[in-house]
Image (cartoon, rainbow, N blue to C red):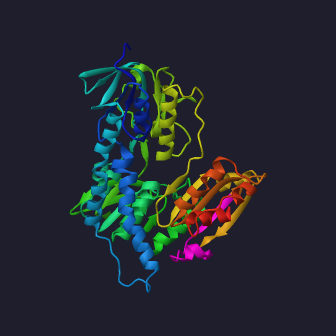
């Protein structure tokens, strides 16, 4: 009999835990999961799932606008109903995910965990739990500006739970969250201002495509303030005042602090057990193992160069399942991890970037998709892709801006991951007509 309560104990119950934790428990490994909030973590409850639910009407109104004359009548978004619909979709997820874990044989413990030693955590300062191996999977949390009046601003979860849409919304930050929520709020009828820290939006995406999205949002009434140097938020009667730049100011009704996300490591007791970390996350080796032999980390909380996206957390969780169940002893070998920003249009990418391809002298082809017949079906005005082939003709990277960019990039992932050459690609015939067929036809 083991001298520990659990073979593997996860701290946090997001994708980095449940995707691998449930199948790990099914192998007979005794698994425990500690979660201080909703089971499922950020993505199902206050991130991806919630966001895509309230974005769906945006996508539909965009298409209806383009097909005006074919479709009759103006579509508008009822914000309150949209939020209620989102809640109906996500309310069931924590219980469903809890059942997924418990039905597999795992125990779910609710509370905040803090390390006592390398094999022991204390939950809510009262319950001691021991484990042979412990996985830190606590994810990220919203960063908050350290300026006067910061408590007057809101985070992404607050936005997703707004019962009524304010007339004027100011978003500080222009990353994933800032740009996606600017798109949604603008399409829903708010006056939106985006305040940039620098002069770049979505800096990790191909900038000419980003500019297409920005220009489109400007035409729709979104205001962008570059190099804003936000200094202070203040209450002024029934509105809010933002001081920025050279003593400039603007008034608004609601502020979203979208200045990024940081590792959720507060009060875990990592210093007590000697786990090494910094502001970028927990340091791990090629086995997702920290410097403390029996402590691992997975998901967004890990310090690495991967995009902080659900597919990466999923893959790491699955890898640890195989490692802990002795199905592998090999180091983790990451696949191609795609990423997308759900603006309208979307920008999606996978593999090496255009910039990296140019530096290596690879062949970079441009596809004018707005004039390709399939994208004309719903009259997409902004649609273009770039594909990068190495010197042996393998497809090694792709980036696309279009309303269907995520599906097109998904279709091409096998070619990038398995390094298909042009002859192999030519043998892949997708369903016609479909976005997958269109993507393979161009590869």
Query: What is the quadrant of residue 285 in the picture?
Result: top right
Q: Nearer the viewer, residue 13 or 104?
A: 104
Where are the magenta residues, as a range? 370-387
Relative to 418, is 344 above or below? Answer: below
Tell me, yes or no, if residue 294 can be seen here: yes
Question: Residue at the location (33% across, 58% down)?
Answer: 255
Tell me, yes or no, if residue 165 can be seen here: no
Q: Quadrant of the C terminus?
A: bottom right
Image coordinates of residue 79 in percent, x first then y, are 29, 66
* Magenta stretch: includes residue 377: yes
Does residue 409 appear left or right of residue 220 in this picture?
right
Relative to 90, is 95 above or below? Answer: above
Q: Quadrant of the N terminus?
A: top left
* Magenta stretch: includes residue 97: no
Relative to 314, is 428 above or below? Answer: below
Q: Nearer the viewer, residue 52 or 230?
A: 52
Query: What is the quadrant of residue 399 in the picture?
Result: bottom right
Question: Residue at the location (55% across, 58% down)?
Answer: 348
Image coordinates of residue 346 in percent, x first then y, are 50, 63
Question: Residue at the location (38% across, 24% down)?
Answer: 30
Does residue 211 appear left or right of residue 127 in this picture?
right
């Amino acid at each position: 009999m083991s001298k520990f309560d659990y073979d593997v104990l996860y701290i946090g119950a997001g994708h980095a835990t449940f995707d691998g934790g449930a199948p790990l428990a099914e192998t007979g490994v005794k698994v425990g999961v500690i979660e201080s909030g909703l089971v499922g973590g950020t993505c199902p409850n206050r991130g991806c799932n919630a966001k895509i639910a309230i974005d769906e009407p945006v996508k539909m109104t965009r298409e209806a606008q383009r097909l005006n004359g074919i479709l009759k009548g103006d579509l508008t978004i009822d914000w309150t109903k949209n939020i209620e619909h989102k809640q109906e979709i996500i309310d069931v997820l924590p219980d469903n995910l809890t059942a997924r874990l418990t039905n597999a044989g795992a125990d779910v413990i609710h509370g905040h965990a803090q390390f006592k030693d390398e094999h022991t955590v204390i939950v809510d300062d009262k319950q001691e739990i021991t484990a042979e191996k412990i996985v830190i999977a606590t994810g990220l949390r919203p960063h908050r500006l350290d300026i006067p009046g910061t408590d007057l601003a809101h985070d992404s979860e607050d936005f997703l739970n707004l019962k009524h849409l304010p007339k004027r919304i100011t978003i500080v930050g222009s990353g994933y969250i800032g740009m996606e929520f600017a798109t949604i709020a603008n399409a829903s009828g708010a006056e939106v201002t985006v305040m940039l820290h620098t002069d770049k939006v979505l800096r990790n995406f191909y900038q000419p495509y980003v500019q297409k999205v920005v220009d489109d949002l400007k035409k729709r009434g979104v205001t962008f303030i570059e190099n804003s140097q936000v200094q202070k938020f203040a209450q002024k009667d029934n509105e809010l005042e933002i001081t920025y730049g050279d003593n400039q100011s603007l008034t608004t009704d609601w502020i979203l602090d979208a200045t990024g996300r940081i590792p959720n490591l507060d009060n875990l007791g990592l210093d007590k057990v000697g786990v090494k970390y910094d502001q970028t996350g927990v340091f791990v080796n090629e086995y997702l193992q920290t410097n403390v032999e029996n402590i691992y980390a997975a998901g967004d909380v890990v310090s690495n160069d991967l995009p902080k996206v659900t597919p990466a957390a999923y893959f790491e969780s699955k890898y640890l399942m195989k490692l802990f169940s002795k199905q592998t002893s090999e180091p983790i070998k990451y696949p191609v991890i795609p990423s997308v920003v759900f603006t309208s249009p979307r920008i999606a990418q996978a593999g090496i970037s255009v910039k990296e391809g140019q530096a290596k002298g690879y062949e970079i082809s441009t596809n004018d998709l707005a004039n390709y017949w399939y994208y004309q079906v719903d009259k997409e005005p902004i649609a273009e892709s770039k594909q990068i082939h190495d010197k042996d003709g393998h497809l090694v990277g792709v980036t696309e801006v279009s309303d269907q960019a995520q599906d097109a990039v998904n279709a091409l992932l096998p070619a990038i991951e398995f390094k298909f050459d042009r002859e192999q690609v030519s043998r892949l015939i997708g369903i016609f007509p479909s976005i997958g067929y269109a993507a393979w036809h161009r590869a």
